[in-house]
């Protein structure tokens, strides 16, 4: 987990859901730490151990694992993403 960014994403270069998640975070002005797992089996294994998931993106806001792109957008639609990002930024 990055100590300088409130959000950590495990991604690959070719994943459209990774791109959408980063676009939403960019739109929100949120800093994030991107960990690219393509061609990096040890990083994918780390992601799987942390999340229990194999697919990308896997996203953490602060210490909270929010899941993937769909879950990130669900938080946004519910009006919960901005408060979560603000809380993580203050804690970091």
Image (cartoon, rainbow, N blue to C red):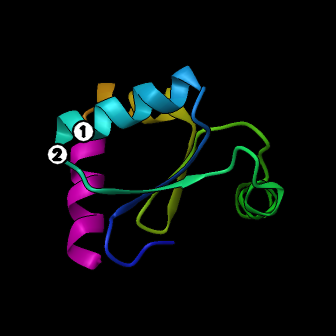
Quadrant location, the C terminus: bottom left
Q: In the image, is 71 to the left or to the right of 80?
A: right
SS at circle 1:
helix
The residue singled out by tag 1 in the image is 26
Other-residue count near label 1 (Cα within 10 Å), few / some / many at <14 / 14–19 / ≥20: few
The prevailing secondary structure element of the residues shown in magenta is: helix
Q: Is residue 63 above or below residue 86?
A: below
Q: Is residue 64 above or below residue 78?
A: below
Q: Which residue is drawn at 75% across and 64% down?
A: 46
Q: In this view, does 4 lie above or below 82?
A: below
Q: In the image, is 69 to the left or to the right of 88?
A: right
Query: Is residue 80 something one can see in this rendering?
Result: no
Q: In the image, is 46 to the left or to the right of 76?
A: right
The residue singled out by tag 2 in the image is 29
Mark-to-mark CA distance, 2 and 1:
5 Å
Q: Quadrant of residue 61?
A: bottom left
Query: Is residue 33 something one can see in this rendering?
Result: yes
Question: 77 or 61: which is nearer to us?
Answer: 61
SS at circle 2:
loop
Percent coordinates x, y for residue 6 in the rendering: 33, 64
Q: Do the residues labelled 2 and 1 touch (CB within 8 Å)?
A: yes
Q: In which quarter of the image is residue 3?
A: bottom left
């Amino acid at each position: 987990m990055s100590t300088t960014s409130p959000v950590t994403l495990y991604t690959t270069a070719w994943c459209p859901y990774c791109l959408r998640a980063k676009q939403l975070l960019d739109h929100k002005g949120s800093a994030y730490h991107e960990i690219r797992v393509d061609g990096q089996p040890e990083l994918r294994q780390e992601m799987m151990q942390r999340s229990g998931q194999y697919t990308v993106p896997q996203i953490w806001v602060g210490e909270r694992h929010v899941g993937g792109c769909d879950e990130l957008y669900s938080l946004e639609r519910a009006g919960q993403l901005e408060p979560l990002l603000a809380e993580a930024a203050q804690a970091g």
